[in-house]
Image (cartoon, grey):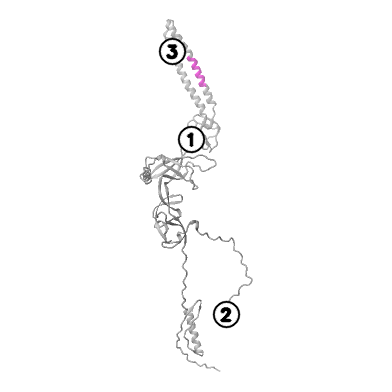
Amino acid sequence: MSKVFENTPVDTTLIPVQRACTGPQRACTGPQRACTGPQRSALYAVIFALAATLGCESKPTTKPAPPPPQVSVAEVSQATVPIIYPFSGTVQAVKYIDIIPRVTGYITERKFVEGSIVKKDQLLYVIDPRPFKAALDSAQANLTRSEAQLTLWTGEVKRYTDLAKQGAGSEQQKEEAVAKEAETKADIEQDKANLETAKLNLEYTNLTAPFEGRIQNTKRNIGQLVDAESTVLTSLVQIDPIYVEFKVTRNELFEMQNLTSGELTGKTTDIANIKFKVTLPNGKEYGHEGTLDYMSSEINPATDTLMVRGIIANPEDKSNSESLISGQYVPVQVILGETPNSLLVPKAALVESQLGQQIYVVNSSNEVEIRTVTVGTLYQEQYVITAGVKLGETVIVEGTQKVRAGMKVNVVTPSAATPEPAKPASKPAETPAANPPEEPATDAEAKR
């Protein structure tokens, strides 16, 4: 048995609907027509489905403006700053000699510790002195013999002279006696010279330090034969004082000449009065100050530089290892005078950019201004600024990465900067509440 369904026509007239949405939940209201029956129910279902698909326009929410960024600042200061030229220097020993024996013989003693500091005239080596002592004794004996011969021939000359006056002796005998006396005197002078040479050779068996310095390692040991004037036994280096050499370019030399002539500072300076300082490998400034003592008169055409040398104290202090060593590289700072009323900013205030070196200035309205500046020398962790800022202006030293030109900032001094809150070492365990609040019922539970 078949069942026939009756098709009832549905009124498809559209009903305008007004939508209004507020908050996360949407509620749509509008003029509705009173209707009954399944036809109106189907129409409402279609309208509600379209409204859910299209969505509702949400009212925009306005976010509060963020507070101005906090920056640390410092004021542009003014001071008298020394004119310093930096160079790359090399330490050179004032004296460096090889210890070479003056006599040939066998080494019998070594009287120094390798690498130690030896004093002037300190005994270093001893060469077997016995052959030279024997030579000295022989020279002394020859001198004594010659002196005895001189006494003899001096008497003979006197005797033959008296006989010749009396007519009893011949003139030839007199002349022979005079010749023998002169020959003996010459032998005596020769013997005296030989004696002096023998004394010197005996002294040369003891090799001493010609000046105070650091002795190097020995190249010959006890028992080895050394040759006079050829065998190198060791080397001796003077370390106090010590030289520091560096190269100056043509342009730097021209500027230094202008400064020392008083053209810029109004005060002439002699080369002997120009001071310099050196920096140690650990970045610490060396404790002594040196003076320039030599400037070459020729520029090397290959490097276009001029060699300048200074001398500086370098005492050996066992409690302080900061001594300069020959051949060591050291940064050199040559002090050529001073400039009064120089403007200084902290080193942290300088920013490198594609436009050059810049400084962020905070004006009276707490707005940021970016200035391109001309930077001079670095003095005590502060840069000398020759153009771009004025005395008393406020510059940003911390927080430049957070600001841009025209932005307002919250200004604090570095000492008044707000410290970050300390973080706990470990997060404490959360204790569950005794009576936790009940969660609100969901829509589905409410409908149930």
Residue 101, compared with residue 181, is above or below; it is below
**Residue furthest out toward the left:** 263
For residue 444, the mark is 2
**Residue furthest out toward the right:** 434
Question: Label 3, label 1: how many angstroms apart (C-alpha)?
Answer: 51 Å
* Label 3 element class: helix
Residue under the image location 46 percent in, 13 percent down: 154
Identify which amino acid the numbered label 2 is placed on.
Answer: Ala
**Foreground tag (3 vs 2):** 2
For residue 131, the mark is none
Q: Position of residue 144 (x, y in %)?
A: 51, 18
Q: Check disc 3: other Cα within 10 Å, few if <14, some if 14-19, many if 20+.
A: many
Residue at image mark 1: 98
Residue span colored magenta: 138-150
For marks 3 and 2 on the same chain, the one whose residue lies earlier in the sequence: 3
Is residue 433 toward the left or the right of residue 209 in the image? right
Residue at image mark 3: 178
Q: Is the stretch drawn in magenta largely helix, strand or loop?
A: helix
Is residue 127 toward the left or the right of residue 158 in the image? right
